Image: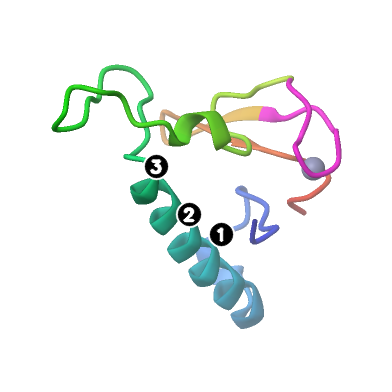
Amino acid sequence: MASINPKKPAGKVTLPALKKLVAAIKEVLAASIEMGGTTLRDFLRENGEPGYFKQTLRVYDREDEACRECGTAVKRIVQSNRSTFFCPKCQR
Ligand SMILES: [Zn+2]
């Protein structure tokens, strides 16, 4: 949503990009909470139901699937032993 390449060092992210990132984080957190959270594996809500935000994730766990914005295949890389998913066209 903030169009930031995940390989960019944090110290090199520009102030306008950081402002977009902060707005996107707030929007995603609010939407996720609204939908009961994000069930990736075994998270269940207090009522025993899974959270339904995962179905709307833009790139996470969607390697080789089409970017919801531009249709480009989502890529997966590993950074610090953690999977990072991103669109190489939207996130430059
Ligand atoms: Zn894209």
- The mark found on residue 28 in the picture is 2
- The mark found on residue 35 in the picture is 3
| Residues packed near mark 1 inside 10 Å, few (<14), some (14 to 19) or many (20 plus) | few
Whole-percent x and y of residue 85?
A: 60, 34
Tell me which label, 3 or 1, sits earlier in the chain: 1
| Residues packed near mark 2 inside 10 Å, few (<14), some (14 to 19) or many (20 plus) | some
Q: Is residue 62 above or below residue 89?
A: above
Q: CA distance from mark 1 to mark 2?
A: 22 Å
- The mark found on residue 9 in the picture is 1
Q: Are marks 1 and 2 in contact (CB under 8 Å)?
A: no
Q: What is the span of residues highlighted in magenta in the rendered image?
A: 65-75
Tell me which label, 3 or 2, sits earlier in the chain: 2
Disc 2 residue type (three-letter): Val
Q: CA distance from mark 3 to mark 1?
A: 31 Å
Badge 1 element: loop
Residue at image position (39%, 42%) is 35
